Amino acid sequence: MIRLDETRLPGHAGALADLLAATVNGGASVGFLAPLGRAEALAWWRERAREVAAGRLAVWAAPDGDRVVGTVSLAFPAKPNSRHRAELVKLMVHPDARGRGLGRRLLATAENAAAAAGITLLHLDTETGSPAERLYRSAGWSPVGVIPDYAARPDGAPAATTIYYKRVPQTAPTR
């Protein structure tokens, strides 16, 4: 896993765009509708560079040669009363790289980085009934509840979303 800071993210944006398009077009619900073209995916990743530079977003990538086969991010709130928590966002594994434990390694990378940053609480949302739910539950995440018709699947159909949280043991001083 490599952390993509503001100097590394632009060089990986194309590979991240390919991953995002393949993930969405393969049916995963990560906030986009299919078909997702490379240009739209690339623009989205390029827009994230400002958030990374400002310290509001941390991005990790799992490279495989010239490709990125997985990614995960942590979004940090700016409010003073929220600095103990972060949101796990955009955990994606390329469809042809699934089933090899990469999702679990990406999740552990984000959790360990959160602990090192003094984050004590993580939260996320995922499509109810998706394969991602098995990963989160087996990694010790607790479901909070389900919101019906919260987001659209890549095909545009409304889908329920489950909210999860996980307490993270503090291993470093609070940031």
Image: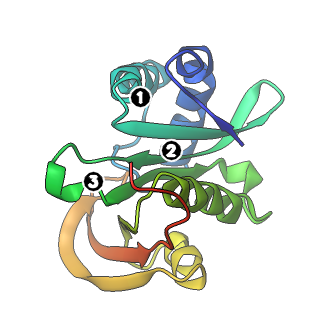
Query: Does residue 170 sit above or below 102 in this rendering?
Result: below
Closest to the camera, between mark 2 and mark 3, is 3
Crowd band around label 1 with a 10 angstrom C-alpha radius: few (<14), some (14–19), many (20+): many
Query: Label 2 amino acid?
Result: Asn
Residue ID for mark 1: 52
Q: Which residue is mark 3?
A: 83
Above or below, comparing residue 94 to residue 10 in the picture: below
Nearer to us of marks 1 and 3 is 3
Q: As displayed, is residue 77 above or below residue 157?
A: above
Element type at mark 1: helix
Q: Residue at x 54, y 26 (%)?
A: 5
Q: What residue did someone put label 2 on?
A: 25
The Cα–Cα distance between marks 2 and 3, rounded to whole angstroms, is 34 Å
The amino acid beneath tag 1 is: Val
Determine the image quadrant of residue 14.
top right
Q: Residues within 10 Å of mark 3 (few under 14, many from 20)?
A: some
Of callouts 2 and 3, the N-terminal one: 2
